[in-house]
Image (cartoon, rainbow, N blue to C red):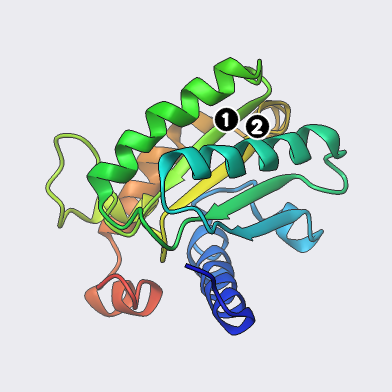
Amino acid sequence: MPFSADDVASMTAEVQQWLDQVVIGLNLCPFAAEPRQQRQIRFVISRAADTAALLLELQQELTRLADTAPEALETTLLILPQGWEDFEIYNELLGFTDLLLQQFGWEGEFQIASFHPQYCFADVEAEDASNLTNRSPYPLLHLLRESSIEAAFAHYPHPERIPERNIEQMRNLSAAQRQQLFPSLL
């Protein structure tokens, strides 16, 4: 399904707002603010509605990252507005993304973080606030450079504590705060 320019602008703005208010605003990822300020984040609306087409788009975006200096393009958010609304189907896709990284020799160079409006950690109830750490307005694939992650971790005390800190922070949000930060999800 083709998207109008207004659709693309609206979806991109919604993801940017989530990034600014939730990811950066709550400091869920202490490394996201700088590339956002430096305009080194690429926001791409996927037009793929099936696995094969999406993997082709993902390959193209990873190739772009590989061919572009981090100073010009640090990371990409691939926004998946159609065909991936069901979390189980989206979750199955992640296995294919790992295979793609292997197939093109990108393991150790890139990693893909996953976000979804229905994100649910294994063995956690869907309503548990911990899931909000990985919930986004649309299904997303966040393409990250391993070297950038390693460099950021080298200067951040106890990076292994970030997930548990984020979960605690989400659980401490009031219902009103959750509604304000995640209006399309709650």
**Three-letter code for the amino acid on which mark 1 is drawn:** Gln
Q: Nearer the viewer, mark 2 or mark 1?
A: 1
SS at mark 2 in the image: helix
Can you say whether 99 is above or below 113 in the image? Answer: above
Q: Residues within 10 Å of mark 1 (few under 14, many from 20)?
A: some
* Point 65% across, 21% down: residue: 106
Residue under label 2: 149
**Three-letter code for the amino acid on which mark 2 is drawn:** Ile
167 and 50: which is toward the camera: 50
Can you say whether 168 is above or below 121 in the image? Answer: below
Q: Is residue 26 left or right of residue 123?
A: right
Circle on res. 111 = 1
Q: Measuring from the top left, give residue 97's x and y in whole percent.
A: 48, 31
SS at mark 1 in the image: strand
143 and 155: which is toward the camera: 143
18 and 174: which is toward the camera: 18
> Could you say which quadrant of the image residue 3 lies in?
bottom right
Is there any visible trace of residue 120 in the rendered image? no
